[in-house]
Image: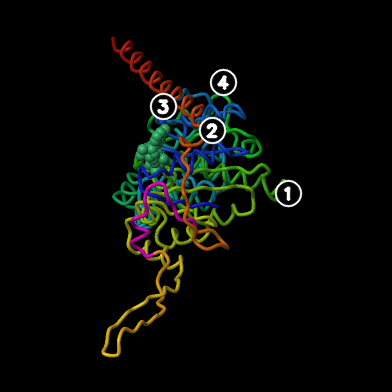
């Protein structure tokens, strides 16, 4: 279980994500906010040789045609699943520190109730957007009651019939969280499309397929959908593993590149503890420890960091506390110092021992690009030379396919612009 922290442009994707994907023997999931000249283009051809390529690209990062759909409401048919889905939408919009105030909590609960109402009657997720637009609509309350969720129905009824300002505030917050669902192009990827193959997380777990989850960053983006899909895949993989003797063989690799930007699974720290020994290998890639703290809170990031059995710290650590913490974990060593003093009796030499940090914090902060510290369970801190894919022997082939795949993205983008232009004219 891996957590890696490195500054932007320091080789996270080229030295960690891409080599791991190219070496993976089983299914692979990748989240990313980039496609051209990045992990998607560098790995898509190689992965197409071992299994099916599934690309969930609701915001057209790779301009990938919609050739699949995934049922975002499949896991929302029980209250816990519906709440988790609502949590992904909230987490994609607000940092952990703001995620616990009244409006966020109430909006997240309301969104959860609406997801449950839709999912338990196999209604499409577009119904949720419609209900968010008209809070007075009684349909979701009735649907929840019919499905036997009386308590949730009563809670939603309470919100709907409460003070108007409060209700409107809650619904407005919920609308912000779910704003990406207003875009029909986005929603099409996560609603049933009878003529397209359905992506099934449980089947994926035992395949050698690859799932590319691509989204832009930030609130209003489709990153909640990306987080929900990654969460669904990892949870399904654990269930499949438990049913088939304890662990997946070959293991599933889940590379959460740019995790704090596009894959804010709020209970990722907790999920890490479930993934252990199940043959599901998560690799969470962050730009800084602070970025993780903003996303999961101090306690959450601490839990994620502790749960990771392999921690990688690369160049660009710009956080004195974090550098000091790593420095302490690196331990001390005895340094021999010799001092010479002159006196009337002549020259005297004293040898003394002094305890010093093996890796002082300033050395960690000045770590050059291409180097990283490895903190793995059971060994002392090690200094690594990172090996980017483009310096490997296979670089010629992969470089060429990456260029080709990048060109294909550009061509798809241009074709679309031409279509739009054609339609306008
Ligand atoms: N195909 C390549 N050939 C040469 N250098 C590359 C190639 N791809 C990336 N790099 C170099 O590697 C650096 C890190 O890239 P990347 O792994 O994408 O960083 P990160 O994911 O940490 O933002 C880039 O600044 C670039 O100089
Ligand atoms: Mg990257």
Q: CA distance from mark 3 to mark 4?
A: 16 Å
User: Mark 1 sits on what residue?
Assistant: 245
As displayed, is residue 215 above or below residue 2? Answer: above
User: Mark 2 sits on what residue?
Assistant: 70
Q: CA distance from mark 1 to mark 4?
A: 35 Å
Q: Residue at x 68, y 48 (%)?
A: 247
| Mark closer to the observer (1, 3) | 1
Q: Residue at x 38, y 75 (%)?
A: 337
Please say whether residue 179 is visible from this viewpoint.
Answer: no
User: Mark 3 sits on what residue?
Assistant: 185
User: Mark 4 sits on what residue?
Assistant: 195
Quadrant in the rendering for residue 261: top left
Q: Tell me where residue 347 appears, x and y as whole percent.
A: 31, 83
The span shown in magenta is 360-374
**Mark 3 lies within 8 Å of ligand 2 (Cβ measured):** no
Q: Residue at x 53, y 55 (%)?
A: 310
Q: Quadrant of ligand 1?
A: top left
């Amino acid at each position: 279980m891996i957590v890696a922290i490195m500054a932007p442009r320091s080789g996270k994707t080229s030295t960690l994500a891409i080599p791991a994907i190219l070496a993976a023997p089983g299914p692979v999931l990748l989240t990313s906010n980039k496609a051209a000249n990045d992990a998607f283009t560098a790995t898509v051809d190689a992965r197409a040789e071992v299994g099916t390529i599934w690309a969930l690209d609701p915001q057209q990062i790779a301009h990938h045609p919609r050739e699949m759909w995934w049922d975002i409401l499949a896991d929302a048919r029980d209250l816990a699943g519906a709440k988790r889905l609502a949590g992904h939408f909230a987490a994609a919009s607000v940092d952990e520190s703001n995620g616990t105030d009244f409006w966020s909590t109430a909006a997240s609960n309301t969104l959860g109730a609406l997801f449950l109402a839709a999912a338990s009657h196999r209604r499409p997720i577009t119904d949720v957007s419609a209900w968010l637009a008209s809070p007075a609509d009684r349909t979701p309350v009735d649907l929840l009651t019919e499905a036997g969720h009386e308590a949730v129905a009563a809670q939603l009824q309470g919100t709907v019939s409460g003070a108007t300002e409060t209700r409107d505030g809650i619904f407005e917050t919920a609308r912000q969280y779910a704003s990406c669902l207003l875009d029909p192009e986005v929603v099409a990827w996560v609603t049933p499309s009878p003529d397209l193959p359905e992506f099934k997380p449980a089947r994926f777990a035992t395949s050698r397929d690859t799932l590319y989850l691509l989204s832009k960053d930030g609130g209003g983006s489709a990153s909640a959908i990306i987080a929900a899909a990654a969460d669904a895949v990892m949870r399904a993989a654990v269930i499949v593993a438990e049913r088939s003797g304890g662990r997946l063989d070959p293991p599933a690799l889940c590379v959460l590149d740019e995790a704090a930007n596009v894959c804010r699974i709020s209970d990722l720290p907790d999920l890490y503890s479930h993934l252990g020994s199940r043959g599901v290998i998560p690799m969470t890639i962050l730009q800084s420890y602070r970025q993780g703290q903003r996303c999961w809170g101090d306690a959450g990031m601490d839990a994620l960091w502790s749960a990771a059995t392999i921690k990688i710290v690369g160049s660009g650590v710009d956080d004195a506390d974090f550098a000091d913490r790593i420095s302490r974990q690196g331990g001390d060593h005895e340094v021999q110092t010799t001092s010479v003093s002159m006196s009337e009796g002549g020259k005297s030499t004293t040898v003394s021992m002094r305890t010093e940090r093996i890796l002082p914090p300033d050395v960690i902060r000045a770590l050059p690009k291409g180097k990283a510290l490895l903190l793995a369970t059971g060994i002392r801190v090690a200094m690594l030379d990172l090996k980017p894919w483009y310096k490997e022997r296979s670089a010629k082939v992969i470089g060429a396919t990456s260029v080709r795949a990048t060109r294909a993205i550009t061509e798809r983008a241009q074709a679309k612009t031409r279509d739009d232009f054609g339609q306008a004219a």
